[in-house]
């Protein structure tokens, strides 16, 4: 990703939500004289009563004049399991302009912070284009790269956009849509059917949902096309507001220690979680993970929709309008949880899970041979009783003993071997209650495939009475495991 070179914004400007110019906070002014029938642009102030017919005709004509975009249906599953259209999505132009300022001078002065900012910027590129719009999910309305009505960043970004681009503000006013401040309650959208101005969540409800489809697609098309016509101002506003709300203020402020010590891609994953909406008082909890991806995913899973079942947690592919498992594993972090092996396929579910596991249901569109239908974040393993394990397996055939060693996995087998061969302080000799045979089997598995480099294991086997002339079958099994012809 190329980095824009403009550095015209200071950090103080950024924290005020600006992306290109300094000064006091920008405000929107609403024309007065709402009773003047010729003052069309005063309609946002006309709450509580019907609009003049001339206003409604102008808004209707303006909306119909916008060329209609092609939308993807957003669906939601009902309690009966059937899916129905819940809204509409347009991905926007992903090749649009970079913000005038991606990394501010203050951020650039701190190399680690600079890398975090760039990783977050790269991460949010996956959330659609600058002119993207989406409705019909748990966020109600999303504009641009993942800035939704659930976050105060949306109103700040949209306000900044129409302040910096008066032409965009006028075009939106003509279509009966605007913002009169920097908060969600400041949205104003004209309901043509009712002939009135709706505000706040009621205004967003005019965009959200599936019906009447044509009316909703008209308004969404207007927002997307007007954004595309003023891409630089929109890009600047969205990125400044995103950084303000999800990196520098309130519950989303990234702790300095995290910036200094965590890998930037891990910080970006957690920042994306904040934008996703499950972030109330979250940094103190995430900070304790010290950047451990498995611990981060465990927290994130519990903060999203899930069910607790027989000692484990199931994160569904879809829950109402949310897609928790798909989002956490594939929609964030460039699939880091999958590619880094933090989660593994879980064949045989239900029945193959263990207490403490977190199981992720994989939506069919994402299922491959490497994912299967379910993936698992294994729970912490219970402390192993080394003595019971050795007591239970030492007398088995060499074939079964080697198989039992394999089943432990490398780390657990190494710890078992260290316990078994520990030095007895009373004798100064390895404890090895059942003699060297179990240790030789463990060493053969720990060094499997090493070839001649593992021949010392066979020497130990000989001292344990396992040689080509004595116990030849066991000796051959050990040779094969080590990889000696």
Image: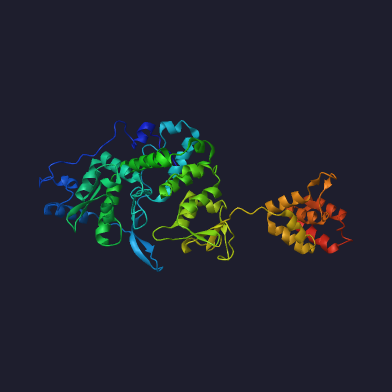
Q: Where is residue 480 in the image (x, y as percent from the top left)?
A: 77, 59
Residue nearer the viewer, 92 or 347: 347
- Residue shown at the point (30%, 40%) measured from the top left: 160
Quadrant of the rendering where the C terminus is positioned: bottom right
In the image, farthest residue toward the right = 469
Residue 67, by quadrant, is: bottom left
In the image, farthest residue toward the front = 426
- Residue shown at the point (79%, 54%) measured from the top left: 439
Residue 16, by quadrant, is: top left
> In the drawing, does residue 124 fall left or right of residue 374?
left
Quadrant of the rendering where the N terminus is positioned: top left
- Can residue 485 be seen by looking at this rendering? no
> In the drawing, does residue 196 fall left or right of residue 341?
left
- Can residue 379 be seen by looking at this rendering? yes
Give the mark count. Answer: 0
Residue nearer the viewer, 414 or 371: 414
Q: Where is residue 154 in the image (x, y as percent from the top left)?
A: 33, 46
Residue nearer the viewer, 357 or 444: 357
What colouring style does the render use?
rainbow
Q: Where is residue 438 in the image (x, y as percent from the top left)?
A: 79, 56
- Residue shown at the point (12%, 42%) measured from the top left: 33
> In the drawing, does residue 395 fall left or right of residue 119?
right
Relative to 413, say whether 287 is above or below.
Answer: above
Q: Position of residue 263 (x, y in %)?
A: 53, 41
Relative to 344, say whether 109 is above or below.
Answer: above
């Amino acid at each position: 990703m190329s980095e824009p070179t403009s550095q015209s914004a200071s950090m103080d400007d950024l924290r005020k939500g600006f992306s290109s110019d300094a000064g006091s906070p920008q405000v929107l002014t609403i024309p007065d004289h709402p009773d003047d029938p010729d003052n069309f642009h005063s309609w946002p102030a006309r709450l509580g009563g019907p609009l003049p017919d001339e206003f409604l005709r102008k808004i209707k004509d303006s909306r119909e004049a916008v060329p209609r975009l092609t939308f993807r249906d957003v669906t939601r599953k009902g309690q009966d399991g059937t899916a129905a259209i819940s809204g509409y999505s347009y991905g926007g132009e992903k090749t649009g302009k970079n913000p005038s300022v991606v990394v501010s001078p203050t951020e650039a002065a701190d190399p680690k912070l600079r890398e975090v900012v760039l990783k977050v910027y790269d991460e949010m590129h996956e959330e659609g284009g600058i002119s993207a719009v989406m409705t019909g999910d748990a966020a109600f309305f999303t504009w641009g790269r993942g800035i939704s009505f659930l976050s105060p960043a949306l109103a700040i970004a949209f306000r900044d956009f129409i302040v910096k681009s008066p032409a965009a503000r006028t075009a939106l006013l003509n279509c009966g849509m605007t913002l009169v401040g920097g908060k969600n309650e400041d949205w104003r959208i004209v309901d043509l059917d009712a002939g009135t101005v709706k505000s706040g969540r009621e205004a967003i409800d005019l965009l959200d949902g599936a019906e009447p489809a044509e009316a909703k697609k008209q308004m969404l098309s207007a927002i997307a096309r007007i954004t595309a016509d003023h891409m630089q101002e929109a890009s600047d506003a969205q990125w400044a507001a995103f950084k303000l709300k999800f990196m520098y203020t309130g519950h989303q402020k990234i702790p300095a220690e995290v910036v200094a010590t965590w890998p930037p891609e891990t910080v970006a994953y957690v920042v994306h979680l904040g934008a996703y909406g499950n972030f109330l008082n979250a940094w103190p909890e995430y900070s304790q993970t010290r950047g451990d991806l498995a611990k981060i995913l465990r927290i994130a899973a519990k903060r999203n929709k899930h069910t607790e079942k027989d000692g484990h947690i199931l994160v569904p592919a879809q829950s109402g309008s949310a897609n928790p498992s798909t989002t956490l594993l594939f929609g964030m972090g460039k699939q880091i949880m999958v590619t880094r092996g933090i989660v593994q396929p879980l064949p045989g579910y239900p029945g193959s899970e263990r207490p403490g596991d977190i199981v992720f249901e994989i939506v069919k569109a994402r299922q491959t041979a490497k994912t299967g239908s379910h993936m698992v974040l294994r729970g912490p393993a219970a402390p192993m009783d080394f003595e019971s394990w050795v007591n239970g397996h030492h007398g088995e055939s060499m074939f079964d003993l080697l198989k039992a060693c394999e089943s432990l996995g490398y780390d657990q087998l190494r710890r078992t071997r260290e316990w078994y061969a520990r030095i007895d302080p009373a004798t100064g000799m390895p404890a090895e209650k059942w003699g060297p045979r179990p240790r030789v089997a463990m060493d053969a598995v720990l060094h499997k495939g090493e070839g001649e480099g593992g021949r010392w294991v066979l020497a130990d086997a000989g001292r344990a009475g396992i040689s080509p002339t004595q116990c030849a079958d066991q000796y051959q099994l050990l040779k094969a495991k080590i990889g000696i012809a």
